[in-house]
Amino acid sequence: MTIRVMLIDDHPVVRAGLRAIVDSFEDLEVVAEGTDGTADVDANAVDVVVCDIQMPNADGIELTKKVAGDVPVLILTTYDTEGDVIAAVEAGALGYLLKDAPEDKLHDAIVATAKGQRTLAPEVAGLLAARIGKPREALSRREREILEGLTTGASNRELAQQFFVSEATIKTHLIHIYDKLGVDNRTAAVTVARQRRLL
């Protein structure tokens, strides 16, 4: 039985390369392509979606949330930060592989994901294991977004305007961020977040 694959990536050259690799395997066939997270996925015509994370209009996380219940998703990306990995897994992605993986690993990951099996690159599995071991340190998506804002030097007022919340809400988020990262100021929070590859 041939596994029907849909490729979603905003780079035409990358999609063409992936199509050539995937179609070179007798048990895999690319039957559809998309350029971003707004792509229509036909659950009746596709067995697995292979999708990048960072794309215009709508990213791979949004697409995963939309289709994960109907079609298994394998994230194939260059991004291996803890934030991206956790967001993808929480969105429902079954697989997470880096684009520098050997072709045979890509094949195995696509097949396993299509069968509903969890498939994670070793680096990704390590990040998740660390997170499970320290659940109190896991940041929410909003907290990660605020951390990104801290890197720009934005004030509490500017962050509040950016996220359409009150300054008090931003302060509360910062308290939680500091507690989870074990720091007591903005600079230290950004430093630790970068060390842990949350940014």
Image: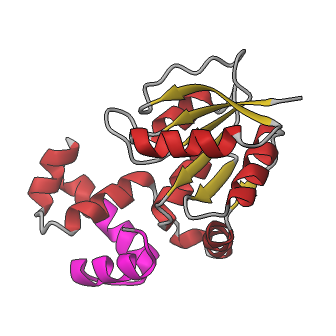
Q: What colour scheme governs how the chains and residues are painted in the rendered image of this protein?
A: secondary structure
Horizontal side of 146 relative to 95 (left or right) equals left
Q: Residue at x 50, y 39 (%)?
A: 16
The image shows residue 50, relative to residue 101, as above or below, that is: above
Q: Nearer the viewer, residue 74 or 148?
A: 74
Q: Which residue is drawn at 46% across and 61% down?
A: 79
Task: Specify the quadrant that holds the C terminus.
Answer: bottom left
Residue 25, by quadrant, is top right
> Which residue range is magenta in the image?
173-198
Residue 4, by quadrant, is top right
- Our reading of the magenta stretch's main secondary structure is helix
| Outermost right residue | 1
Horizontal side of 149 relative to 35 (left or right) equals left
Horizontal side of 192 relative to 160 (left or right) equals right
The spot of residue 153 in percent (x, y) is 12, 69
Task: Specify the quadrant that holds the N terminus.
Answer: top right
The image shows residue 197, relative to residue 34, as above or below, that is: below
The image shows residue 168, relative to residue 150, as above or below, that is: above
